[in-house]
Image (cartoon, rainbow, N blue to C red):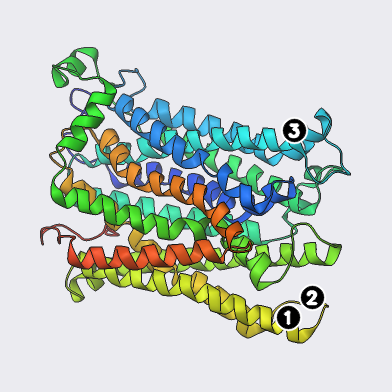
Amino acid sequence: MENGDIIQSPSPLWKIVTVAAIAAGIQFGWALQLSLLTPYVQTLGVPHTWAAFIWLCGPISGLLVQPIVGYNSDRCTSRFGRRRPFIAVGATFVSIAVFLIGFAKDIGHHAGDSLEKSTKPRAVAIFVVGFWILDVANNMLQGPCRALLADLSANDHKKMRTANGWFSFFMAVGNVLGYAAGSYSHLYKIFPFTKTKACDGYCANLKSCFTIDIVILLLVTVTAISTVKEVPLTKQVQDEETKAPAPFVGEIVTAFKTLKKPMWILLLVTCLNWIAWFPFLLFDTDWMGTEVYGGKVKGNAHEVKMYGDGVRAGALGLMINSIILGLTSLALEPVGRLIGGVKNLWAIVNFILCACLASTVLITKVAEAWRQHKGPDLVHPPLNIKGSALAVFGLLGIPLAVTFSIPFALASIYCSNAGGGQGLSLGVLNMSIVIPQMFVSVVSGPLDEAFGGGNLPAFVLGSIAAAVSALLAILALPNPPKQISLSPGMAGGH
């Protein structure tokens, strides 16, 4: 790496694969968050209406942490390199946070929470602290990983597409592993110490999943930072590259001022796209447990069991979603060329997203009608209802593959002259993702409550946002130059 900044030639593929493998550890944890934590926090006594507010820590930390980490990693003069110190610290704090979340009930019980009371305030406090640390650490970890891949690619577009392809591949691997672990109800038997007086089978299963996550993340992280070396950025070179350094806020303002119209449109389409995605990503397994299976977080033993069965079915759906996500990623470039460009591809998949979210209303109404006809005894929904719900999960893997690829590919084109480093540019793009998550976290709980509770109102809001995003992609988003690949690329990665 000449002057600690630019590698003269692209690094070998094994180095890129080794760094990209960290995505599996990151995404394993994210998969567990999305599939298990919303139901888990309700078992601590937090009502559904307020559960969404806990998810505010993710977008707030992303809004603040990722640009700051990106800015400082661009300028870090550590003898270990620019990116690796942030990756190591991020992985360490993820492990600490996961421990706090998994053992929140046990720690809360030892601190004085009553087993007889449904609300466990001390456990909730420990969970929230751990959850905030987890989101901060994930943002500290993910941004420098992507930036390190860009450094290793040495501005070679083909190598960059290959690197992002491997990163996407390991994201899918992490998703599949995480959702598979979440859908297996007896995983805690492998770790018998996880089931305690304060922690039932569902809680013990969560602890077991997070224990596996810690092992996987530390394994891939230690392997990457110990085998892939960086040449440190010297203070002299840093001064040469930033002759008139601006304060961090000034850099952000400058980055936004230099954005061209295509990038602003991209940020708007991305923002609406994530407003559509977040309601389902936050409450998908809760929807399966409550609306599809008819269970309850707080009810009699049978209702609680039905809810748990529905949540595990949702985790299975998310695993199917991840498999479709990985397969679809392979076909993005040829399909994009076939249908006339990136904006047509993005528009089509956003219409698919719109239809899938709207279909949750129909599936819910059919499930409710079936339960009324069946009588008071709760049983698993018939195959056609469960199959339809799982089909929605699977179909959503198609637009999710586009969401994980096209915005990053287009941002790398539109922001090439924005004046910021790799880390700062990723922070700017990340703002169009975390701001809508904050919006959804704030409005989804009150919106659901205003319409009688449940998840459907937020899903309908997401469906509308997806339709608007699709129309904007068609009418306003320009196609990238023809010589640039439509997706971050799967070349060489699969």
Contact? badges 3 and 2 (CB < 8 Å): no
Q: Between 121 and 1, which is closer to the camera in this rendering?
A: 121
Badge 2: few (under 14), some or many (20 or more) residues near its Cα, within 10 Å?
Answer: some
Sooner in the amino-acid sequence: mark 1 or mark 2: 1
Q: How many marks?
A: 3
Q: Please give the name of the residue rendered at 85% of the width and 62% of the height, measured from the top-left corner.
A: 300
What label does residue 312 carry, if any? none
Q: Is residue 488 visible?
A: no
Q: Quadrant of the C terminus?
A: bottom left
Identify whether 102 is placed above or below 85: below
Give left or right: position of 430 versus 414: right
Q: Secondary structure at mark 3?
A: helix
Q: Quadrant of the N terminus?
A: top left
Mark number, residue 122: 3
Q: Residue at x 24, y 64 (%)?
A: 473
Q: Position of residue 132 (x, y in %)?
A: 55, 35
Tell me the residue that label 2 is attached to. 378
Of the numbered discs 3 and 2, the one sitting upstream in the chain is 3
Residue at x-position 52% and y-position 68%: 320
Q: CA distance from mark 1 to mark 2?
A: 7 Å
Three-letter amino acid code of the residue under disc 3: Arg
The residue that label 1 is drawn on is: 371
Q: Residues within 10 Å of mark 1 (few under 14, many from 20)?
A: some
Q: 104 above or below 375?
A: above
- What's the residue type where badge 1 is placed? Arg
Residue type beneath disc 2: Leu
